[in-house]
Amino acid sequence: MYICLMYSSELIKGTLKTIVLKLLKEQGKMYGYEITQRVKELTNDKIQITEGALYPTLHLLEKNGEVETETEFIGKRVRKYYTITKQGRITVDLKVNEFVDFMNTMKFLLDVELKVSNVQSNR
Amino acid sequence: MYICLMYSSELIKGTLKTIVLKLLKEQGKMYGYEITQRVKELTNDKIQITEGALYPTLHLLEKNGEVETETEFIGKRVRKYYTITKQGRITVDLKVNEFVDFMNTMKFLLDVELKVSNVQSNR
DNA sequence: ATTTAATACCTAATAATCCTATGTATTAAA
DNA sequence: TTTAATACATAGGATTATTAGGTATTAAAT
């Protein structure tokens, strides 16, 4: 039985924007730290987005008009909420489709079968 | 209907070693140019490995003892054949398993279904 | 009461890995 | 004879992540 604790960063590279936009699309507004925790949780610790990767990505997405921000104060602590824009919704659909297409190609190329249903339950 | 002509390099990034080793494992000895053409062919032009990416990767794999080379002359033209080593076979199994695991996680995260059978036929 | 862990933001330096462009050279096709 | 295909290779630049560092608040543990 193969056990993988965490994926090599090379694999995640290139999917971060897709993951973030998809989460924002499904879960509504979220703040940065929340995104890292949610992804960690959803993937059983297999994908752990570092803050050094996340924040520059969020800033880039904002610059490109794919997310919008609003700052909120929880006591004295600042929290920056991100919301997906109309443009972001277009982008995320394209990116998810591209990734699915890519996975199908890789599946064929590597000659492997994927699970039909997922055993992960913490959704 | 979604149509993708070619994948963004970001996606392929991180899978190149896996693709190359898997091909060498399945198809026996191959030379660099042959690898680029075979991948292009198998993926219906969707994955086009550039030479600037392939050769450094092959040299790295050789340096790491995962492939071995033998030079052959076809007329006056040189051809460098690559063969997978015992170590390379271990690595490729690990990498393919990791990638399959990663795809299952992403499939769950992006909430998508993949094709059960592939329509691609040129195998 | 104080230290540690968790929450919450951010950036700079570095590393990895790819693409583009370029170079060389042979062989086949137009 | 020129162009396209075959076949190798590397240098420079781009992208995108990690590591490591910084600041600050709040909750939990000692």
Image (cartoon, coloured by chain):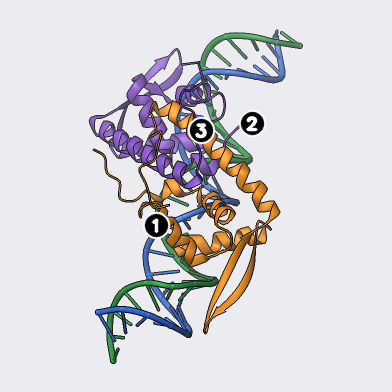
Chain colours: A purple, B orange, C blue, D green
Circle 2 sits on which residue? A3
Point out residue B115 in the picture as x, y percentages from the top left corner: 38, 34
Asked whether the residues under marks 1 and 2 belong to the same chain, the reply is: no
Which of the numbered marks, if any, corresponds to residue B41? 1
Q: Chain of mark 2?
A: A
| Kind of element beneath mark 3 | helix
Circle 3 sits on which residue? A51
Left or right position of B9 against B4: right
Q: Residue at x 39, y 52 (%)?
A: B122
Point out residue A1 in the picture as x, y percentages from the top left corner: 65, 30
Q: Chain of mark 1?
A: B
Q: Is residue A7 above or below residue A33?
A: below
As shown in the figure, which amino acid type bears the numbered disc 1?
Glu
Residue mark closest to the camera, 1 vs 2: 1
Point out residue B53 in the picture as x, y percentages from the top left corner: 48, 60
Q: Chain of mark 3?
A: A
Label 3 to label 1, Cα distance in Å? 39 Å
| Kind of element beneath mark 1 | helix
Residue mark closest to the camera, 2 vs 3: 2
